[in-house]
Image (spheres, helix red, strand yellow):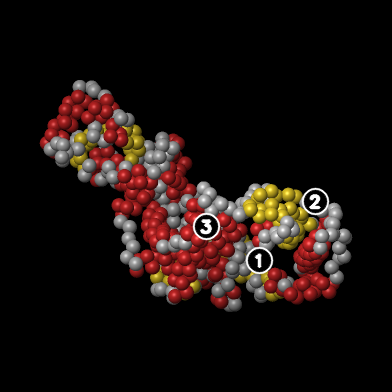
């Protein structure tokens, strides 16, 4: 299917789609993360001298949170994982670059056209799907294109390594036999209910466990802060906008809004000359002047096979889809008007605008008001940011600054630098400021911190406590629960070991609820994973004797008895699957080895 998509993406329509993609990259969502790429040049890390910016890390973090994949409570942990991933990717990027791997803009455009994520139910590229899913993923235009290019090159490296792996015929046969092996076994799970009432842990037990696991009861260095937040949206609330300003903003947006267009394309070159093409369109113009329907004429005259059947309908387009000359014509027409003959790289066109893709003024009034207020408030916001900066630097507290700016002083709970606080205090720059020497040790107000292009924060530490191990009395309930769980696990293991010993000696064991698994495979449903793995880990039974073992399971300890083993068929239909699986595992090992080697040899500095 992918090959068919690629073969079908060489014509005029595909080139139009590619142009649409490029323009969408240029126009869509550009404001959403601009601040991250202009807020500074601090490095989160460097890899062989190449920077990984803190903004790049933060962008990925916020993208994960907005997509719902990462709970806000795990933001700090996720931030570290993102940095690790970016470092791995950068080493692979450098390796690919040194190896001369390259993907052209045209190849990248065709790849985007073929991505199923952007195709409708009929397998055709959908600009609406593309726009919505790009937005949902939190990508900016340039970052999506850049990341897709880098990811494609990384896959080329990985696919090259994967293609180099192989298995010998004997290895394939052995692997298939093992993979398709079937085992019949019985099992029973022992839980706390199978034990007598345990004794309560003694103080000595608690003390011993606490001393052996003190790292579990460490509290990091923490602070409480007072802080103030200046938001441009709050500043904008005081800005008055007139109806004329809203209408001017609407007309500006309308001039740039996507146009719903139809066209009639006549090509020239091998089949006809340019003059013949112009004469063909002149014939169309003559029929239009006589009242003929544009859609009917498109079906009869247009050389664009993808739109001719739809009366020339191209849907809604943005500027840049088909080039400057096409745009100049389409965006200068009112709905219902038809252009003069327009020449582009694809041929000659007659263009008809059928609508403007924008809500009505009244439907868009609220959004327009917010937009205009933000634009009108920029200067006032900048003035207040400067005043906030001056006052925070000079003041000995935040209350006077808040009073001057009409802000509210808020107080945080305890938080550490690694975990951060809630809300704006989860921002790494804010948390870092709270633990900076000037703020933490000298007691000064922090600098004004830019958390995004419309928000500023300043803080002052009001309480501090050093990292420490929490006393046993404070965590006694947690320690007691842990000791009880550990004692229960040990008693269950002892009971399981005694039971297995009795079974191996041929002694009868009562009061056990056995479950039977007949001819189970390695991926059998209905058997807990730990028990299934133990069943396939135990040796083959000899002379009809059951082989016994026990293993920790989710609910306690399980006893497993393997009764028979049936080898898999090396010539089965699943043999190729087993081979592919093994080669995939080999490839993963090779790729992991490469990435680890690249990181070991790279000069990596984390900040």
Mark 2 sits on what residue? 513
Q: Nearer the viewer, residue 333 or 537?
A: 537
Mark 3 sits on what residue? 173
The residue positioned 49% from the left and 62% from the top of the image is: 586
Give the answer, above or below, for where 550 lies relative to 513: below
Choose mark 1 or mark 3, whichever is in front.
Answer: 3
Q: Secondary structure at mark 2?
A: loop
Q: Of label 1 and label 2, which has the lower sequence position?
A: 1
Image coords of residue 374 (percent x, y): 44, 51
Q: Of label 3 and label 2, which has the lower sequence position?
A: 3
The residue positioned 55% from the left and 76% from the top of the image is: 438
The Cα atoms of the two marked residues, 1 and 2, are separated by: 50 Å
The residue positioned 24% from the left and 23% from the top of the image is: 292
Res 323 visible: yes
Q: Which mark is residue 433?
A: none
Image coords of residue 385 (percent x, y): 47, 62
Q: Nearer the viewer, residue 27 or 483?
A: 483
Is 593 on the left-hand or right-hand side of 124? Answer: right
Q: Of label 1 and label 3, which has the lower sequence position?
A: 3
Picture mark count:
3
The Cα atoms of the two marked residues, 3 and 2, are separated by: 38 Å
Residue 209, located in which quarter of the rendered image? bottom right
Is 509 on the left-hand or right-hand side of 87? Answer: right
Mark 1 sits on what residue? 414
Q: Residues within 10 Å of mark 3 (few under 14, many from 20)?
A: some
Q: Secondary structure at mark 3?
A: helix
Q: Quadrant of the N terminus?
A: top left
Q: Nearer the viewer, residue 116 or 313?
A: 116
């Amino acid at each position: 299917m992918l090959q068919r998509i690629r073969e079908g993406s060489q014509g005029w329509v595909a080139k139009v789609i590619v142009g649409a993609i490029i323009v969408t990259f240029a126009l869509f969502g550009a404001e959403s993360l601009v601040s991250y790429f202009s807020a500074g040049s601090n490095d989160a890390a460097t890899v062989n001298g190449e920077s990984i910016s803190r903004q790049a890390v933060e962008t990925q973090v916020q993208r994960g949170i907005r997509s719902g994949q990462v709970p806000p409570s795990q933001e700090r942990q996720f931030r570290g994982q993102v940095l690790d991933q970016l470092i791995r990717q950068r080493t692979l990027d450098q390796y690919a670059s040194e190896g001369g791997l390259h993907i052209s803009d045209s190849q990248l455009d065709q790849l985007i056209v073929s991505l199923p994520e952007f195709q409708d139910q009929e397998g055709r590229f959908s600009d609406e799907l593309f726009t919505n899913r790009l937005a949902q993923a939190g990508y900016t235009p340039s970052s999506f294109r850049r990341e897709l290019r880098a990811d494609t090159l990384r896959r080329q490296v990985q696919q090259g390594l994967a293609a180099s792996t192989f298995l010998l015929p004997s290895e394939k046969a052995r692997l298939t036999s093992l993979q398709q092996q079937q085992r019949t076994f019985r099992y029973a799970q022992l839980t706390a209910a199978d034990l007598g009432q345990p004794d309560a842990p003694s103080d000595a037990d608690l003390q011993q466990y606490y001393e052996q696991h003190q790292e579990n009861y460490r509290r990091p260095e923490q602070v409480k802060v007072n802080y103030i937040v200046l938001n441009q949206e709050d500043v904008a609330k005081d800005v008055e906008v007139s109806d004329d300003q809203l209408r001017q903003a609407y007309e500006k947006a309308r001039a740039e809004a996507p146009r719903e267009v139809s066209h009639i394309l006549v090509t020239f070159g091998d089949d006809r000359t340019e003059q013949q093409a112009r004469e063909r369109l002149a014939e169309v113009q003559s029929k239009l002047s006589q009242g003929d329907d544009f859609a009917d004429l498109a079906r009869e005259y247009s050389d664009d096979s993808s739109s001719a059947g739809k009366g020339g309908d191209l849907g809604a387009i943005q500027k840049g889809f088909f080039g400057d000359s096409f745009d100049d014509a389409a965006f200068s027409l009112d709905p219902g008007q038809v252009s003069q003959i327009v020449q582009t790289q694809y041929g000659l066109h007659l263009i008809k605008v059928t609508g403007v893709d924008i809500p009505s003024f009244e439907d868009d009034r609220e959004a327009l008001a917010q937009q205009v207020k933000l634009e009108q408030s920029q200067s006032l916001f900048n003035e207040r940011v400067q005043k906030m900066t001056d006052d925070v630097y000079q003041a000995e507290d935040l209350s006077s600054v808040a009073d001057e700016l009409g802000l509210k002083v808020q107080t945080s709970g305890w938080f550490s630098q690694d975990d951060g606080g809630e809300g704006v205090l989860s921002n790494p720059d804010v948390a870092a400021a709270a633990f900076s020497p000037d703020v933490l040790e000298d007691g000064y107000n922090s600098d004004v911190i830019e958390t995004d292009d419309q928000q500023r924060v300043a803080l002052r530490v009001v309480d501090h406590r050093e990292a420490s191990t929490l006393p046993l009395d404070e965590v006694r309930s947690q320690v007691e629960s842990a000791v009880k769980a550990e004692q229960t696990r040990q008693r269950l293991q002892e009971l399981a070991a005694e039971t297995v010993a009795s079974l191996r000696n041929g002694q009868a064991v009562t009061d056990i609820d056995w479950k039977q698994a007949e001819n189970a495979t390695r991926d059998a449903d209905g058997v807990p994973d730990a028990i299934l793995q133990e069943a396939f880990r135990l040796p083959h039974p000899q002379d009809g004797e059951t082989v016994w073992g026990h293993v920790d399971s989710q609910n306690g300890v399980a006893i497993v008895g393997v009764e028979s083993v049936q080898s898999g068929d090396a010539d089965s239909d699943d043999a190729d699957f087993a081979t592919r699986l093994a080669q995939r595992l080999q490839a993963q090992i090779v790729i992991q080895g490469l990435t680890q080697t690249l990181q070991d040899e790279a000069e990596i500095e984390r900040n």
